[in-house]
Image (cartoon, rainbow, N blue to C red):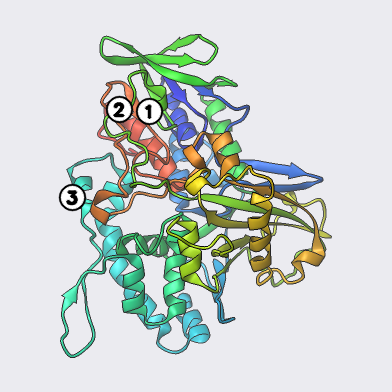
Amino acid sequence: MARIAVIGAGMASLAAAARLATGGHRVVVHERTATHGGGVGRVERDGFAFDTGPGLLPLPAVQRDLFVKTGRETLEQSVGLTQADPAARHVFADGTVLTLPNASRSGVMEALDGALGAGSGERWSAVMLRTREVWEATRRPLLEDAVSAATARLREDPYPAVGRRGLLRRTARARSLAEAGARELRDPRLAALLESYPLAYGLDPRTAPASAAVLAYVEQTFGVWYVAGGLRALADAVYARCLARKVEFRFGAEVTGVLEKDGRAAGVELADGSTAEADAVVAGAPLPALHRDGVLPGDEWPAWGPTRPPGVLTVHLALRGGRPVDAVHRTVVHPADRDRALAWTFGTGGPADAVPEVTVLRPDDPALRPDAEHEAVTVRMAVPPQGAGGLDWTAPGAADAVAERAVTAAQAAVPSLWERELWRIVRTPADTERETGAPGGSVPAPSLAGADGALLRSPNTTALPGLYRVGGWAHPGGGLAHAGMSGAIVADLIAGGPGGSR
């Protein structure tokens, strides 16, 4: 039985801890804050409750595997889990409204033809069929297995080359997701739909590889799910599973360094001057700040180029009046000026008054509201991280001005929103940075093929034997499913396996 020190109590760390403890190891989790869950948090006030992280769960098979491998109760026995249907409603700049069913290829095609015109569904389906090749080529090396030679080969985009139309036809690969959408979908609204999936993960469609279309394919193939009580209820269930497996938690315990002995990780150093010895260390946080000698190979920040990935601004709204029966859980409101919005979000020269794409979440969940005469709504949008271009989200009025633009856009999804509002809570990347330690409050995206490897993440192993990485800053990247898989990969590596869930 080995002693394992886990740094952080985010979702990836919890997944690793539960699996390692089930394997017979003594696991101690050191968390600098007072609670578990990392970015999957909760805000409560006056009988209202809101998720601070994602509102829907993709690829629930990852969580099902975690619960099956660590105890008797399944995921469905531990939380209430239902498909979100419809999966989303999209409101485009020209006023077109598109409602997409959950996990139904034929239903999506029918909805697209009905809202955007005949032939729209067929063009979208053709892109998804090509994207299936991306999924088949990347599923194991970019999600299920540890970093290997197969992962390294994915520096090249596997999205199929498509012949261009015209007199001089030739076959060429799209240089970006935006180029693929414009060339193959031939409708700005369809292209905006495709771009909305990577945008939800903080990826710029103008620079993201065409392989980023796999994010749309995964959602439309496997569906999205809602956890009763919000995604925080899932974090609570995983935490409870850790406790059942005798994982020890030490909250308010900030780790400041990694101990070394005989060329191996030998424990952690804490802010209070104490140490905790261990046979292996699992870090669910960016490692440079934890290593006394500076940056370890492969830990350079940021790993994506000269700018940090964006963060998320959320506006939690307490509304008077019940949730209408025709409301949908998620509505995406597309911007009137896509170029201005992207330029501001990704720091390429956009005006400060740009209004990016917003996502409006309206869960039909009695646990999140004081009674049936009120509604809890969250508005989310990708925004520049704290400090980007001198932006200070803590400056007076900075957050409120952007939040007002987000709420104004959200009126397209929730009519009479201003008239119904009781109060709001605004959260910015500065809050994310303070609560999770993520530099600038950036939110990591999943690992993706292409872009010459710019979106591949650091391996779960490190240059220091006995020190492992989990979480969004490590392979296989950000997102709940990827966080769960990083925990599975590291637990298997520590057990002597090749890395993965077995």
Residue 132 sits above or below residue 270 on the image: below
Q: Quadrant of the N terminus?
A: top left
Residue 8 visible in the displayed image: yes
Task: Please tell me which residue is depicted at 64% across the width and 61% down the height of the picture.
Answer: 406
Report the residue marked by disc 3.
153
Residue 382 sits above or below residue 31 on the image: below
Please tell me whether mark 2 or mark 3 is closer to you in this view. 2
The x and y percentages for residue 194 are 42, 69
Residue 3 found in image quarter: top left
Report the residue marked by disc 1.
288
Work out whether mark 2 precedes mark 1 in sequence or the reverse, and give the earlier one.
1
- At label 3, the amino acid type is Arg
Q: Is residue 190 left or right of residue 413?
A: left
Q: Quadrant of the C terminus?
A: top left
User: Regarding mark 2 in the picture, which secondary structure is present there?
Assistant: loop
Work out whether mark 2 precedes mark 3 in sequence or the reverse, and give the earlier one.
3
Report the residue marked by disc 2.
296
Work out whether mark 3 precedes mark 1 in sequence or the reverse, and give the earlier one.
3
User: CA–CA distance between discs 3 and 1?
Assistant: 26 Å
Task: Please tell me which residue is depicted at 72% across the width and 47% down the height of the picture.
Answer: 49
